[in-house]
């Protein structure tokens, strides 16, 4: 996916800071899913922005004041259930791969409810293609289709696609303080 980043040229005029291609990230744990991590900050920049942020291995979900922008494509039939034929070693390997590629992601998931996760973020979702659903922690499903906009406020949820084509959405995650997590003195 092409990413174009525009910033300041030092005189108050816009200039292209980057025009590149972002390859999708894939995981053996989520076969067929694609994640494009387009823009990630762990703190908001000051304007004017005149250069690309330094490349760091950021955690997948943002810290308070951080943000993430990207796209997710969920294939039809994704269940989040590991293949019953996988050995414990194979499950450990795909879990390690997920944690390596998306640091912090696995800690957000509820092992008792496949796919269910919650984060300390306000999530802005825009459905770009296909049809899917977001399941809430109490089992309620919210149907979504192309053009729908969803604002999710740190609640347990999971994404599903029961259709015949990929369910594609863009996301912007804004990291916020989580009052449910004790702060250190």
Image: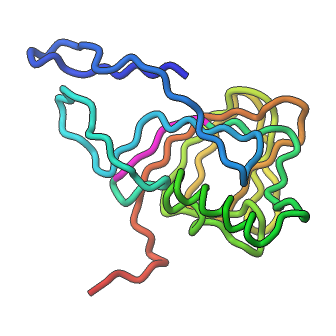
Which quadrant of the rendered structure holds the N terminus? Answer: top right
Which quadrant of the rendered structure holds the C terminus? Answer: bottom left
Q: Is residue 19 above or below residue 149?
A: above
Going by the picture, which residue comes out furthest to the bottom? 185
- The boundaries of the magenta stretch are 66-71
Residue 72 position within the rendered picture, expressed as x and y whole percent measured from the top left: 64, 38
Q: State whether the magenta stretch is mostly helix, strand or loop.
A: strand
Q: Is residue 30 above or below residue 183?
A: above
Q: What residue is shown at x 50% (from left), y 19% (from top)? A: 2
Direction from residue 51 to residue 171 in the image, left or right: right
**Front one among 25 and 14:** 25
Residue 162 position within the rendered picture, expressed as x and y whole percent measured from the top left: 89, 42
- Mark yes or no: residue 88 visible: yes
- Where, by quadrant of the figure, is residue 119 drawn? bottom right
State the count of labels. 0
Residue 105 position within the rendered picture, expressed as x and y whole percent measured from the top left: 56, 60
């Amino acid at each position: 996916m092409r990413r174009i980043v525009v910033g300041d040229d030092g005189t108050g005029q816009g200039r292209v800071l980057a025009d590149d291609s972002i390859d999708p990230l894939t995981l053996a744990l989520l076969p067929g899913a694609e994640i494009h991590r387009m823009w990630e900050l762990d703190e908001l920049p000051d304007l004017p922005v005149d250069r690309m942020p330094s490349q760091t291995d950021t955690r997948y979900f943002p810290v308070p004041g951080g943000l993430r922008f990207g796209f997710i494509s969920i294939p039809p039939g994704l269940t989040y259930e590991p293949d019953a034929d996988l050995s414990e070693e194979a499950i450990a390997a795909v879990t390690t791969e997920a944690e390596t590629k998306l640091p912090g992601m696995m800690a957000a998931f509820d092992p008792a409810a496949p796919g269910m996760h919650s984060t300390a973020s306000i999530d802005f979702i825009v459905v770009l293609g296909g049809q899917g659903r977001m399941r809430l922690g109490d089992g309620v499903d919210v149907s979504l289709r192309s053009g729908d906009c969803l604002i999710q406020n740190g609640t347990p949820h999971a994404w599903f696609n029961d259709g015949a084509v990929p369910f594609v959405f863009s996301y912007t995650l804004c990291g916020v303080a989580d009052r449910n997590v004790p702060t250190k003195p």
